Amino acid sequence: MLTELRWRTAFAFLLACAASASIAQVDPGRPLRIVVPYPPGGSSDIQARLVAQGLGERLAQPVIVENRPGASGAIGTEHVARQPADGTTLLLAAPPFVITPHTEQKLPFDARKDFAPVSLMSRAPMLVAVPRDSPARGLADLVAMARAQPGRLAYGSVGAGGLGHMATELLALRLKLDLVHVPYKGSAPALADLAGGRLAMMLTTQLDMAAQLAAGSVRVVATGSAQRSRLLPDVPTVSEAGFGAVDLGYWFSGLSMRVGTRPEWINRVSGEIAAVLQRPDVRERLDAQNVETVGSTPAQYEAFLEAEHARWAAVAAATRAGK
């Protein structure tokens, strides 16, 4: 009887140790990787490196950033989708992660089935911007101009099916506007035309048009988030401008792992990421990029992604952006 009791106690102890080890670390000696599906030096890359440094310190395990750019993030995303579900590879996802599944006919991955949400990292609201000399002093003026000239007011974006394009189409659907889409190969030429008055409006982030805002060549007439941005407290929302609750997208980046990764490890990493994002030095660096830090649980990030999928699926269907 005593022998059996000792055996059970020892077995329970071994199980506890194994569980503790699995939560504390995955594959000791192997570094964790954060795959950024965009080029080095951009805001997504900077965010990933900030989190990688802090996460490595908290896990006492190397965390490196690997850039795999191309195809609006699809190349790096596919790479992560093909990795083993051992908890060593994370994907940094941006809005195209939930838009392209509804605008592209074929993708080499399934954004819902291949990935397990870890944490929403940062947010940046879409802003409705007009040229400095535009007669529109607020969103109501801009809407009145568009309704008086159906099919004549042009807006720019960095490409068909991107966040700027889809967010503007969502705004047009909700406010019953007939606008002309002018796609560009990058934000710089689009913003140059906006500043020069060749475009009537553009939806983009504060980060993308920081230089134009500093120069005073463009003005923001509304923010497309449900609440005012912490970084732009004086800019009213679309709702506050009198057009009802319209959320045009309010996120910048998040992290996921391969589906099948142990939930306890996902929860552990998610908690550590949240702690890193609350560090004053990290928040200060991200504020300087005009993005807001978040840090969420896996369940919160999953619910957020599902809402985003529903939003952009409806817009793609209504505008035939996916055809």
Image: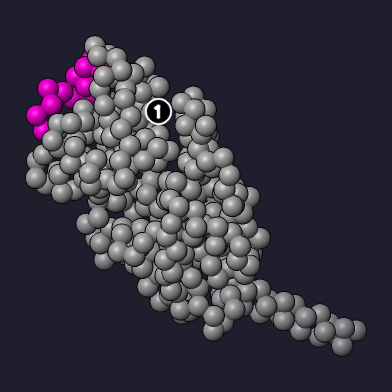
* Residue 196: image location, x then y, percent: 13, 35
Can residue 258 be spotted in the picture?
yes
> Does the magenta run of residues contain 133?
yes
Q: In which quarter of the image is residue 190?
A: top left
Q: Single out the residue that lies furthest toward the top.
A: 148
**270 to 149, vertically: above or below:** below
Q: Is residue 179 left or right of residue 216?
A: right
- Relative placement, left or right, of 275 versus 192 is right
Label 1 environment density (alpha carbons within 10 Å; few <14, some 14–19, many ≥20) = many
- Amino acid type for the residue under numbered disc 1: Leu
- Numbered marks: total: 1
In the rendered structure, does residue 247 fall within the stretch colored magenta? Answer: no
Residue 261 location (% of width, % of height): 63, 63
Q: Give the range drawn in magenta.
A: 132-146
Residue in the image at 46% along x and 26% along y? 319
User: Which residue is found at the position 82% from the left and 84% from the top?
Assistant: 7
Q: In which quarter of the image is residue 192?
A: top left
Q: Nearer the viewer, residue 153 or 258?
A: 153
Which residue is label 1 attached to?
170
Residue 123's spot in the image, x, y percent?
35, 48
- Residue in the image at 37% along x and 73% along y: 53
Q: Give the x, y percent position of residue 75.
A: 50, 58
Q: Which residue lies furthest to the right in this view?
A: 1
